[in-house]
Amino acid sequence: MNKQKHITRRGFLKKGAGLAGGMITFPYLVPSSALGKAGGVAASNRITVGFIGVGGHGRGMNLRSFLANADAQAVAVCDVDPNHLNTARDMVNKKYGNNDCATYKDFRDVIARNDIDAVVISTPDHWHVPISIMAAKAGKDVECEKPTLTIRGGRVLVETMKRYGRVFQWSTEDRSVDVYHRMCELVRNGRIGKVHTIRVELPSGPHNPGNPASMPVPKGFDYDMWLGPAPWAPYTKDRIHWNFRWIQDYGGGQLSDWGAHLLDGAQWGNDSEYTGPVEVQGKGVFCEGGLYDTAKEYNIEYKYADGVRMIVKSGTPSLRFEGSEGWVGNRGWRGKLQAEPKSILDSVIGPNEIHLYTCRAGEQRNFLDCVKSRKECYFPPEIGQRCFTIAHIGNISMLSGRKLKWNPEKEQFINDEQANRMLSRSMRSPWRL
């Protein structure tokens, strides 16, 4: 019998754990059942996964998607909110018909388990980088919700994943969505000529200022752990869960939240996903008189070194590329592809042209495949870092109220120390990167 049939997925990963994550051509030594090609998957060939942060999106998108893949085994869930925790536990146990799912309030208990191969992080933004780094150092592969909180924090994450040879996926589905994939392939293959303008619209919000009044912490809710590395602040329901994104201590508003989707599409189509703009100028309207302090409306213009302009404003989620020979884009997230001339839509991408890397089954499936192959995921650390940086420098420009020159190679502003001080944040003890 072929000896390769007896090599378990976990044994394979242990042998490859010390190697760099860039081994694109490393052969599969995993049975076909572990690739989802057989009716059943042996337990030894499943990727064991712990879920850190199981709120609405953590359960409804990430946990649900992994449970639908037979070669993934959810073994633990973690959340500071007992309601989220118990709901996620029940989802897992119902799926497997047992009561084996472990529950934790402290994510460190999840990453300390030697029998867990990978973690999925669906926490507020300010926790993304610290947990991802700790998980990588503990030998876990990582899928993490987008975005980062700061540019320098994101750079530390990128370097950590390289150093430890971990597979890492920023969790966003747009690269698997046909309309964006098709749009970007048309642009990359010159169907609209030379790109000169990119137009991005993202949702506005928040639509109320948020109530800063202190409230009692709900029973069982670990609020100190929720705050984590962020500055201490009194508990209020308007601070936590969905609302965190409106507060600069935890997020960057819609510009970074939604921008992680459509700004990535802009970078992908523009073939600038490993670099970024060289200039930014933005104006924003901010909430007043309440808790929330991110921009609720914005109009930002970026310029790339080759002269391409990118205009980002609040409105209807949209992406559009304009070139010397026409334009292609859509209105509304996943909206129907449009172009002028319309013949662009009938264009066939030839076998020798650019075919952009995707996974039609989504980011979770792509992550599982890459954990096995050790290939780079479709939204890896560096590409995410460049995308999120666009949002961060946009926010900094709006807060500073002036045009800023940006060096994408050094990841710092040119001749502006005040702006450069906004590239990182201090962290509340005992947390650090």
Image (cartoon, helix red, strand yellow):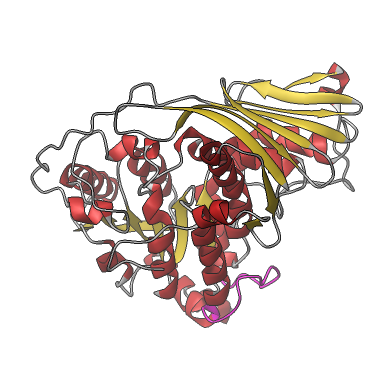
Q: Nearer the viewer, residue 144 or 201?
A: 201
Residue placed most toward the observer, 34 or 294: 294
Q: Residue at coordinates 58% horizontally, 79% vertically from top-left?
A: 19
Does 152 sit left or right of 41 as displayed? right
* Residue 29 covered by magenta stretch: yes
* Residue 278 lies in the magenta-colored region: no
**Viewed as shown, does residue 107 lie left or right of 246?**
left
Q: How many marks?
A: 0
Quarter of the N terminus within the rendering = bottom right
> Image quarter for residue 230?
bottom left
State the image coordinates of residue 51 (x, y, percent, origin top left). 33, 55
Q: In the rendering, at what x and y percent does residue 168 appear?
A: 53, 61
- Return the x and y of residue 262 as percentages of the image width and height: 61, 35
Viewer-proximal residue among 189 and 312: 312
Above-or-below relation of 167 to 366: below
Secondary structure mostly seen in magenta is loop
Residue 173 point in image, percent of width and height: 55, 41
- Stretch of the chain drawn in magenta: 16-30
Image vertical order of residue 18 relative to residue 182, above or below: below
What residue lies at 41% left-to-right and 45% top-to-bottom? 62
